[in-house]
Every structure is written in structure tokens, then in C-alpha cells.
Image: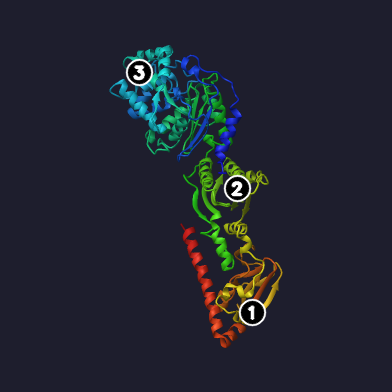
Amino acid sequence: MPVKSPIEKTLEEVHALFKDNHAGKLPDYIPELAKADPAHFGITVATVDGKVYEVGETRQLFTIQSISKPFVYGLALEDNTRPEVLAKVGVEPSGEAFNSISLHPETGRPVNPMINAGAIASTGLVQGGSSEHKFERILAMFETYAGRPLTVDEEVYRSESVTGHRNRAIGHLLRNFGILENDPNPVLELYFRQCSIAVDCHDLGVMAATLANAGTNPVTGRRAIRGEYVESVLSVMGSCGMYDYAGEWIYRVGMPAKSGVAGGIIAVLPGQLGIGVYSPLLDSHGNSVRGIEVCNKLSLHFNLHIFNILQSVRSVIRLKYDGAQVTSNRQRSREASELVRAQGHLISVYELQGDLVFSTAEAVVRDMVDHAEGTRFFVLDLKRVLSVDQSASLLLADLVEAMGREGISLVFTHATAHRQLRRFLASRRGETAGGGWVEFEDNNDALVYCEDQLPAREEAGPAEVEFSSLDALEGMTLDEAALLKARAAERRYAAGDVIVRMGERADSLFFLTGGSVSVRLPMENGALKELLSCRPGVVFGEMAFIDGSTRSAMVVADTEAVCHELGRADFEELGREHPALQIKLLRNLLRLFSANLRKANRELAILGQ
């Protein structure tokens, strides 16, 4: 089964939570709108990089109605100067219903472009040689926002035109004060037509995301409005978009928004996402009942309030690689190492950076979901992450659950400082089957953990190996291997024993045939940093032994260990009595050193990107 994104899962849960809420009523003052099916309910979330999540009836057509107002206001700003628009349409909230006649008593200027009076004035400011030309421009603008061709619902248009007596009265008042400079009727018909454009919930999400993306449609890449006017549009949406509910909306939900009496709502989180909701049952303010509930729930769940959002980068994925490209520092036999590399693609490492908020975490989660097939472990390196907010913590915790159901584990490194994330993760411990999460101090420990659980683990980590099978003895006959073994004293160590001490003279070469040991370096704080972990079949201590220097680190037995120690005197005697055998040993040591150097260079090229 494909892994389901936590975003999609949350939308499904929110949809299920409110689908049985039948409060509210259909608007009957426009007869065609009263024919809508009250059960219709869709939710869309679109991100600024073009990902669209949707659930419910997101492709059910309905008319845009008052949601058209901020978009036409933006077009009016582009067609005129800001002073010219402000002279005819204010930007102050009215605290009154959408169809209120809120005009300045002396100038007749509507108080804002989100009430009908201001919207009609905005429509009158759209440039064009004729009404038909003006509407063509308006429709083309909406098509750019939505990213697809749109049409007018002619029946709704006729219904609005026939019953729009209050709007006609407003139009004549605007003409009386000179806000509309000519016959108001063509402007009113243009306004009725713009409100009757048919859209669906998917369109609303993309349109909202276009405003969130500074005016560029994130799906098509086409610009719908110049970026310098987006802030003006969002400002009036934030203060006036929900009419006499605007104050409570911005207090609770915290995103610029606009509703329409056909049941649509859009909400915009600048720089991150757009939300579209469709449900035709309205409250006393003329806003979708379910739409209000959905936006409030999503804002709380994902911490989307505009005044709670940290500055974020566009992408937090600094580097991505798999366990075949970069392996742990555990030294294994050549055969075991090849088995680990052959299945290293099952391990995916993500090095993250910057701030993890909803939008940046969503991009990481989406990438992981897209690459879940064929992955057994995801390692998330948080070393360069500055902060992880509540919404990002929740997303990652939900992802642990989703991945765990498919037997995929998440492994976190450098997560100690991110306490909120660790609390959310702790709440998921033990709730997954076959997957789950663990954390380590660094990436090497995480890679060792993942490699030890690969399907090749049994072959990759035998408890003990034959001396003759060591990589350092490649090309030697059994007699030669026996001769070398006879000169190397067998040593047995308990877990925790120090085999090599830092700074001592390198008089021995060690062949590890049983257990595991690690190369460690003392730190200034007294801790021991593990540089290398060795499994049976490898040789250690060879560098200082060959060049005659002192030991640069210490070697400690991690478990009970068996080593064969070749002293310097025996090594030199071997060269005098069996020079060909010594040459074979030195050649193999050089080959192993070269292989490690190539590995280091390859990984440095990847990690240094």
C-alpha cells in the first residue's frame, strides 16, 4: 500500500468531523443558489510550490460570488494608480453585512472593496473599450488564477440580474456621488457576471495559493497579478474579507480570507499555502458554516495563524543521499561491506536546514512519501535545523505513524534541542507496527543502526570468522595463512577492555576474528567520540604500525573480542624468512587502505555538495 501523506489524512479527518454538520441555510434571495445540494462539501489545500491536497466534492461547480471581489480589486489596482483607486474605494472595515450601503456621507466613497458597494466601484474601475472587452479581461484574469478555462453560469447570472434590486440601488447611489462616472447599469451587469463565474473547490485552493505565492500560479507558473499589489489585496481580505465576522475571523483563524454566498471560502497564508472550502449552507453572516469550522480547525491543528509564523526558507532539504552512496564508519569484511552496499538503497538520509514550519515540513514529508516505496529507513538529520514549530512536529509525528504501518522506520539525529518535536514523537512510541522511530546523536550511529537491520544483516555481521578468510590475507595459500597465524598471538578481550592506547608506540598489528571493537578519540569534555567501528574480518592499527608512529586514537572492545596480534619483531622476521609472504600482506594492507580512501573521497564529494 502506498504511504498516505499526513496532510491528506488530516483533511480526511476534518472532512469527516464536519460533514454531518447541517447547520445554516441556503441563500434564497438568489433563487438559483437555493437549488444547491446542502450535502456538498469539499476541502482543498494548495502549497506555494504547486502541491494540491483535496478531499470531498472538490470538483463540484458553483459560482464564485463575492470571492471574486479581492481579485477584481487587484485588477483595478493594476489598471489604475493606487491614489485613483483609493479615491473611489476605501480600505476600512465596515463591521456591517456584505450588502450594507456603507458610503461616506460626504463623498459617497464605499468604505472597502469587500462589501457590495466597494466591489461594484472596483468593477467600474476595470479598463476596457466595451463591457464585453472588460469582462473578457476579468474572465481571463480568473482563468490565470485558477489555471484552467472558466465559464459563466448563465442561469445564476440571470437570477442575480433579475433579483439584484438592492445592488442596482447601490449602483445608482455610486453614480449620484460620481464614484461611477457613467450609466451604472453596464457596470452592474458586469458585476453580476463576474459573481456568476463557475469554479470548484480545487480552483479556490489554487487561486488562494496564487495570492500566497506573490501572484504567480504555483501550478502553471503564470503570473496573475503583479507582486506589488498582492499585499494590498491581502490587506483588505484580512480586515474586511469576512464582513461583520472579520474581526473574530482574524482573531481565531488568522489568515486573510474571503467568502461567497454560494458557499465558498478562500484563506491565504502568505508564502506558504492557500485553502479553499466549499459547503453551501450559510450562517447569519453569509459565510459557509462548514467552511468556517474547517479553516478554524486547520489553523489550530497546523498552527497557521499569520502572527505565529516564523520566517522560513523555500526548501529545508540541504542534502539527500542513500545508504549505498554513504555508509557508516563500521569496518566490515569486504564480503559483508558489499552486502551492505547492495542494500544501502533501502536507507535514505535527509540533511535538513533552517526553520521547520508547516510549508517547509510539508515539502519534506511529501518528498519522503513520494520515495517511500523501496525504502526501509529514513534518517532525518536535524543538525542544521534552527527550529521546529508545532505544526511541523505534528506532521513528522503523524508521518512516523503512517510510515510505521508500512514497516518503515524514521531515525532522527541531532534532535536533542528540539524538545517539542521529541514530545510529539514520544506520543507515537509503541503505536506503530513494523516501523516506528528512534534517535541518535549523530549520523554514523544512525547508519550503523540501519545497516545492522538490513536483510543482509546476518551475512554482514558473523560473530567470528576464520583467520584464513581475512581480507588482509587475500591471495595467500592455506599454508601461508597458517604460517602467518602461527606468528600472531591470539588475544581475547572482555567488553570495555582497552586494546590500544592513544599515544603509545605502535608495535603491533591486529587481525580481528571475533566480536567488535571501536576506534575512539578522547574529547575535551572527557567524552569518547567513536571514529570507527570494526567487525570480524578486518585489520586495525596498521597505519601507525607501518610508518612507526605513535597511536593517534584508542581502540576499545565493544563486546568480547578475539584478535591475533602480530608484533613488529615477528613481522620483520617474517620479511627475512618469507619475503614473498610479507609482500602479499603489505600489498593487501595497501589495497584495504586505498579502498577506505576511495570511500572517504566518494562520500566527501557527496557530503560536500
Q: Counting residues from the N terminus, which is met first, the one under dot 3 or under dot 2?
A: 3
Q: In which quadrant of the rendered image does the N terminus lie?
A: top right
Give the spatial CA distance, label 1 vs label 2.
52 Å
Q: Mark 3 = which residue? A: 187
Q: Residue at x 48, y 45 (%)?
A: 313
Q: Image point 52% across, 22% down: which residue?
A: 280
Count the marks.
Answer: 3
Q: Amino acid at mark 1?
A: Lys
Residue 374: x and y, percent? 54, 51
Mark 3–mark 1 distance (CA, rounded to whole Å): 99 Å
Disc 2, SS: loop
Disc nearer the start of the sequence (1/2):
2
Write down the residue under mark 2.
418
Q: Residues within 10 Å of mark 1 (few under 14, many from 20)?
A: some
What SS does tag 1 mark? Answer: helix
Would you say residue 543 is visible in this rendering? Answer: yes
Q: Sequence order check: which comes first, mark 3 or mark 1?
A: 3
